[in-house]
Amino acid sequence: MTPAVVWLLPAHETTHYELMGEVYAHALRSLSEKIPIWGVSWNFSWPTSRRGYALSIWNGYGRQIGFWGKWRLRQMRREVEKMWREEGFVPHIIQLSSAPWAPSLAEIWKRRFSASISPPLPSLSRSDEELPFRLPTTGLPEDERPIPKTVCLFVSQTAAVEAAYIAEILALEKYVVYIVGTPIESTPLRNSVHRFPYHIRLRLGLSWIETELYALRASILILVGNALGEELLIELGRPWVCRKDHPLASHAYAGYEDPTQLPILLQSISSSPLNRLSPEEFTQKLVAYYTRMAKSN
């Protein structure tokens, strides 16, 4: 039995300012080559008075729909179910993520379609050692090893000031710092580049595949800010570092309480690359998990 899967996503590539929408799109597109899959997201805080949605069709199996604006959950559900009826799609498994609205929608579809609910990826790793809880790379080949004393800061929307502070601390220690992400405010970061033009490189607003290129040049990745915070789930082959009070800090390689601790902390972390999770490996393990899950019901 080939299971039909629905992922309730925290972000969509066309309806969110953060990078995670693109990361999920790459992961689901890879899965869609093996199993029927729909990604469903809802950005209820999208800054517009109008509501709408965008539908992406990847191939015969894969769909991703992103809602934005003031939808009622019931209206959104009916819109999706209408498309399912037209395509003859019946979900067997509902995959949760960190989206706050997802559990209630998953329960409705569990009752309507006798579907099983799969917990978010971090929880899966505790119950199945064969299953990666990380999200895969885009599949880019790694042509070069990480550059020593080079870090990549992933900056969330509201963390520009903190990222600028961290970048300058590391620049004083002669680190080369790439700053990526989609912060709403860029002035603090530009000021830091002006002060340390040879050590701080600003690379904001890039696509996910371009962002990954800069991450692969670094020996260590630092997540700054909490917005979605799911960047820690991306298996890029580099150690992730974040604040100890981050919601997913247990999945990071190391944590810090104050940015001034970073220079000493980074010296203790090896610059040797870690294993990367390719789209093919991710798909193989996750499809096997979903198939076992479907057979057990």
Image (tube, helix red, strand yellow):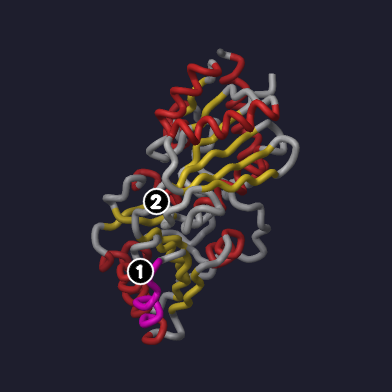
User: Which segment is the magenta one?
Assistant: 184-192
Residue 103 sits in quarter? top left
The residue shown at (50%, 30%) is 129
Mark 2 is surrounded, within 10 Å at the Cα level, by few (under 14), some (14 to 19) or many (20 or more) other residues, namely: few
Q: Which residue is mark 1?
A: 160
Does the magenta segment cover residue 96? no
Quadrant assignment for the C terminus: top right
Mark 2: amino acid: Ser
The residue shown at (58%, 26%) is 289
Q: Nearer the viewer, residue 225 or 266?
A: 225
Which of pointers 2 and 1 lies earlier in the amino acid sequence?
2
Report the disc number at residue 137.
none
The residue shown at (42%, 45%) is 70
Place of residue 237 in the rendered image (x, y in percent of width and height, measured from the top left): 54, 53
Mark 1: amino acid: Ala
Report the disc number at residue 45.
2
Position of residue 196 relative to residue 96, above or below, is: below
